[in-house]
Every structure is written in C-alpha cells, then in structure tokens.
C-alpha cells in the first residue's frame, strides 16, 4: 500500500498534468495557476545555464530565469560556492580586482553575440574560473616554494578550459572559442582597470618607461624577481599600494594588473618571448 506521502505526490502530479482530481469517484476540474521551481544536477545533465530538455518536456513550458545583475552578487556567489584547496603552510591572498575580472568576464559573456544566450552563461562559469585561477596560483607557489598564493593576470590563461566547457558559440569562426574568450578576458581586465584608476593617475608610471626601460613578467616567475624590478620604478610604489599590495606575491599580482591595463589602454607595448612577456614604452 502506498503511504500518504506517495499518494500526495501522485495527486499533485495529476493536478499539474491534468488539472483535475478525483474525489470519491467524482472528477473535479481545477482551474489552477501553478508556480513551479525546478533544479537539475549539473553533473547529471549540463553545465550550461539553460533549463534542460527533459525538464522542459515534463512541464510543457519555457522557464525563464535571470543571472546576477550586479558584479558584487556574482562575486558573493563565487566565494560562497568555492571549492577549497587546503594546503598546509600556504596563505591565500587573492586581490579584489582579480575577483572582479573573473565576474566581469562572465557578465561580458552574457552580452556578447558570439556566445549563445539561449544556452546561457551560468554562475558556475564564474565559480569554476575562480577555482582554476586559485589552483594555478597555488601550483606556482608550490613549485617556487613561496608561502603566499596570489592570482596574477598571467594566470588568466588557466580559465580558458573552465569557460569553454560551459558556453556554446553561435557560430564556429576563425579561432573558435579561444579567440572569443581571449578578447573577453582582455575586455574584462580593461574594464576593471578603468574602474580602478582615473585620468592621468598613471602618467608618471608611463613616463618611467621612456628611454628603453622594460619589465618582464611570467606566471612562473618568482615574486622576488618582481620586487627587484619594481625597485627600479619609484612611481609604481603608490600605485601598487592603492591596489593593496603588501607581501611579494600580492605585489607581483598588482604589478601585472597595472602593466596589462596600461597595455590594453595602448600606453605600453607588450612583447612575448619564450613564455615571458615584456612591457615597454
């Protein structure tokens, strides 16, 4: 004999599907207006944001949702759902601007015509990208025997895999997903950079690069090497301090963010050589 919970469940399904219920053999028609909330396990179905087809078939309707409209809400979800990477002896020091870059990338992806907005760009993109960024920074710290873990701009290449698996392009053109994501990453960095600094705030930094001076960066470069190069540019000190740079790892991350922002603003050139990048006038 089915228990009460099973009978209630069957009754509810009948009401939802047929809009009627039998009471002592009499069929009663119910002109009901039902509000349904459904969820799907992403591991069983899909990593994309669109409601899956089996659920749509069951409900016989199109279910529309919205994603976080504010960057702050996206970041809050990233932090709440983050899978921790416990590592004894290591201290995580992710800068707020790197969190903003990850969230900004997702928000831009939800607007770009190259990405299918019918499939959607889930908040899971932000969560997985943040996890990948932190894990890449932790991997560097382990290899270089550094105690602080701070994601850098040069770590952003690590999020390509976690993003491409969760978006669907409208068309397959030249370069495919890598090209689309590369442009979105650059735009995300530039947007956050422009919100971090105003007007001619960095003119003295740009001027310091005149005369052939340059700075090398790489995702595998020790933080101490960044500190050595920073010592040669006095104008960088207040700029990095504004970004919250303190220990060598966070200082290296802040330097890369400033240099990449200046490059994307067309104020510095950027050369690639043997896995390293050189910023120059």
Image (cartoon, helix red, strand yellow):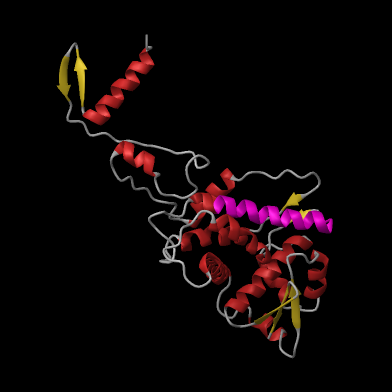
Left or right, residue 159 beside residue 3: right
The dominant secondary structure in magenta is helix
- Judge by depth and name the residue closer to the eye, 273 or 224: 273
Q: Quadrant of residue 101?
A: bottom right
Q: How far from the left and from the top, in percent, is residue 233?
A: 76, 79
Outermost residue, bottom direction? 211
Q: Quadrant of residue 259?
A: bottom right
- Judge by depth and name the residue closer to the eye, 21 or 175: 175
Q: How far from the left and from the top, in percent, is residue 158?
A: 64, 60
Q: Quadrant of residue 51?
A: top left
Q: How far from the left and from the top, in percent, is residue 254?
A: 69, 66
What's the residue at 33%, 16% (across, down)? Answer: 7
Q: Is residue 12 above or below residue 223?
A: above
Start-end of magenta stretch: 126-146
Q: Is residue 200 above or below residue 275?
A: below
Left or right, residue 31 beside residue 228: left
What's the residue at 30%, 36% (across, down)? Answer: 35
- Judge by depth and name the residue closer to the eye, 136 or 213: 136
- Judge by depth and name the residue closer to the eye, 58 or 36: 58
Q: Is residue 261 above or below residue 49?
A: below
What's the residue at 43%, 51% (across, down)? Answer: 67
Asked if residue 127 is among those painted magenta in the image, a careful observer would answer yes
Quarter of the figure that contains the C terminus: bottom right
Q: How far from the left and from the top, in percent, is residue 54?
A: 38, 40
Asked if residue 111 is among those painted magenta in the image, a careful observer would answer no
Quarter of the figure that contains the N terminus: top left
Q: Is residue 145 above or below residue 281?
A: above
């Amino acid at each position: 004999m089915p228990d009460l919970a099973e009978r209630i469940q069957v009754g509810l399904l009948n009401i939802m599907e047929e809009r009627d219920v039998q009471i002592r053999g009499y069929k009663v028609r119910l002109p009901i207006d039902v509000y349904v909330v459904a969820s799907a396990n992403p591991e069983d179905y899909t990593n994309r944001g669109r409601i899956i087809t089996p659920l749509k078939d069951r409900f016989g309707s199109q279910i529309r949702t919205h994603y976080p409209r504010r960057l702050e809400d996206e970041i809050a979800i990233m932090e709440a759902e983050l899978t921790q990477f416990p590592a004894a002896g290591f201290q995580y020091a992710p800068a707020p601007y790197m969190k903003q870059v990850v969230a900004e990338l997702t928000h831009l992806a939800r607007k770009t015509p190259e990405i299918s907005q019918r499939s959607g760009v889930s908040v899971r993109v932000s969560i997985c990208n943040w996890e990948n960024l932190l894990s890449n920074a932790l991997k560097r710290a382990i290899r270089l025997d550094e105690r602080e873990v701070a994601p850098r701009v040069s770590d952003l290449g690590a999020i390509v895999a976690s993003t491409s698996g969760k978006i669907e392009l409208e068309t397959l053109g030249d370069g495919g997903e890598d090209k689309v994501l590369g442009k979105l990453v650059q735009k995300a960095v530039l947007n956050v950079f422009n919100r971090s600094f105003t007007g001619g705030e960095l003119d003295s930094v740009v001027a310091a690069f005149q005369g052939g001076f340059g700075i090398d960066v790489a995702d595998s470069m020790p933080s101490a090497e960044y500190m050595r190069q920073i010592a040669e540019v006095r104008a960088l000190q207040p700029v990095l301090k504004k970004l919250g740079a303190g220990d060598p790892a966070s200082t290296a991350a802040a330097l890369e963010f400033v240099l990449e922002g200046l490059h994307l603003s067309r104020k510095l050139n950027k050369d690639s050589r043997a896995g390293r990048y050189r910023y120059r006038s």
